[in-house]
Structure formats: structure tokens, C-alpha cells
Image (cartoon, grey):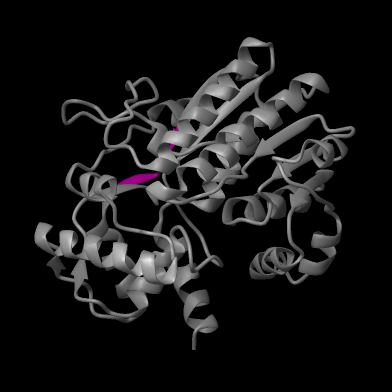
Amino acid sequence: MVLVTGGTGLLGSHLLFKLVNDNIEVRALYRTSEKLDQVKKIFGYYSPNANILFEKIDWIKADILDIPSLELAFIEVTHVYHCAAYISFNPSDFKLLERINREGTANVVNMCIALGVKKLCHVSTIGAIGRPISNKKATEETEWGRQHANPYAITKHLAEMEVWRGAQEQLQTVIVNPGVILGPGFWESGSGTFFKTASKGYPFYPPGGSGFITVADVTRSMINLMNSKITGERFILVAKNLSYKEILGSITFTMGKKVPSKELKMWQLQIGKFADQIRNLVTRKPRTITNSTIYGLQHPTKFDNSKAIDALKFDFEPLDEVIKFSAQLFLEEHS
């Protein structure tokens, strides 16, 4: 039995589709029934038999912070894909981020050790990869530092430390550090916000950039690593390093919108940060522009994916097709 935590998110739902479509016996955690509808929607993007595939999953209502429910979910489980995480870049959310991302991961690791799980695949982030001092690309071995890191990246680094602890206690583990994951369905978070922003036809784009990868390539990499003899390793999963101008330009062009041509200046970002703070105080909506955000835009990191290519023996798929597919779905759902 394979267990997937975070099965109702972008990556988790796509991973579940791939597993059940390959006739793998799988169990998944959920917290609220409303999120299950989102998974069904994702399945419907790829198969006319979405409901049949969805019903193959053994859904367990559980929380990675709730040990009793987690114990029930782990019964007869042999392999675990740990995708669950709380994502926020708001400094005031640090305690909650640490509790879910670090403590929750510690609970998963402890359960794996106690119940003899054969292998754990932990999903981290490129934010937990160190920043190189020079203009070289960051690798899995680049030293990580807390300075200028956002709260989410800090807590995901702490979560990785829990996984390495498990590895020292003889648990077979692999860690993946994906870049920005491109895929459809979750338009209010992650890469979905790129499509939402692009649809508005703004003339501005932020400076900097990041590493990008399709959701299909992340799931394929995770399954290949889980089925391999590789253990005690981490892998950067990035298909291509792109500037935000390039990625937003590609999405806006696909949507038939005018490509943004004006880079946001530092003074505009600082005003945006101040406005974001006011919006957070008034509406309690999460902050999106912080000091660490601005630093990251000013000092973008490029990532080396050669270790993953060598280990997995495949080339990452081009981003254009998933951008086109996702943009089409976004436009259909927001017509």
C-alpha cells in the first residue's frame, strides 16, 4: 500500500492520478471533503473515467499533526510520498509553518520508522537549496543559509533535517526539491497565480526569475526515485531556469494577451510591500511581498538539474505544452 500525504494539492492530486492510473494500490489523506472535489476536477482534465479512478483511492480523514489519525492511515503502508505542507511567505505565519512543515514531517518520519515503511519520498522546495556566492548555478551541495530566506523555505529546510534524521535511523529516503511547478487547476496559489495574473494583461513584470518544471515531470521523477535503489539523496527538479519576464510573456502570449514589457522598479516594489502590509492588516489576507521576497527578486538563483538527469535517465519535458494546456483550462473556467 502506498500512502500520499497532501493528496488534495496540485502535486498530490496529479501524483494520485498517475498512481491509480498505473493500478497502484494507494491511500491518501484529506482534511475536508470540499478539497476532494478539487481532486476529482484534476482527474477530469486527463480522463473520462475520473470518478472511477477517484474511487480507487482509499481516502482517510487525517492530519499529519494528529498522531492517532496518522497511525490509522499508516496501517499496511509500505511506501510514503510526503507532499503535505503549509505554504506562506508571511513572517507572522512562521510558528504555524514550523508546526506543520517541521513537526508534521517529524511525525511522518517517526511513523515510517516505527511501522517499518520501506521508503519515504519527501517533497521539499528549491527554496531549501543554498544560494551560490558566485554566479554559478546552485546544486544539491550548495551550502544553505537562513539569511534572506523566506519563512516557508526556512521551515522546509527544517523539515529536510527531520528526513535526514530518519535516514540516520535506517529509513530509506529520497528528497526532491522542485522549482515552480506548472500545472492546471489551482489558480489561487503557486503557479496558478501566474495564469491569473497573465489573464489580466498587466504591462508590468517583476525582476528576477526561478526554476520551472511541469507537474507531470515532478510526479514522474518521484515515482522513478521511489522505485529505484537510490536512497539518502536529494534532487533538484528544474526543467528550465527562466526570468519572470519570460514565463509571464509565454503565458500571456498563449492567452492572447499583450506581453508585459515594463520591469517593476525597486521603488515600486517597496510601495507594493507597504500596500501589502496594509492589506494584510485590514483583510487578514496573506502577505505576498516581504523583504525576503524583494531580495529574491533582486538576487535570482539559477539551478543545476544535472544530478536528476543523470540519476533518472530522462530529459525534462518542454514547458510550452503544459503552459498551453493550463492556459486553455484557465480561460474555459473563467470565461
Q: Is residue 97 above or below residue 74?
A: below
- Please tell me in which quadrant of the rendered image residue 67 appears: top right
Q: Residue at x 49, y 50 (%)?
A: 87
Is residue 16 left or right of 124 when viewed as pictured?
Answer: right
**Residue extending furthest toward the bottom:** 335
Is residue 144 left or right of 36 when viewed as pictured?
Answer: left
Q: Is residue 111 above or below residue 245?
A: above
Q: Position of residue 79 (x, y in %)?
A: 76, 31
The magenta region covers 236-241
Q: Position of residue 217 (x, y in %)?
A: 53, 46
Q: Residue at x 41, y 33 (%)?
A: 128
Q: Is residue 198 above or below residue 21?
A: below
Q: Is residue 239 magenta?
A: yes
Q: Main secondary structure of the magenta part?
A: strand
Residue 323 visible in rendering: yes
Taking depth in this image into account, of 87 and 214 the one nearest to the observer is 87
Q: Is residue 206 magenta?
A: no
Taking depth in this image into account, of 132 and 49 the one nearest to the observer is 132
Quarter of the image with the N terminus in it: top right
Q: Position of residue 4 (x, y in %)?
A: 72, 43
Residue 227 visible in rendering: no
Q: Is residue 97 above or below residue 138?
A: below
Q: Residue at x 78, y 24 (%)?
A: 117
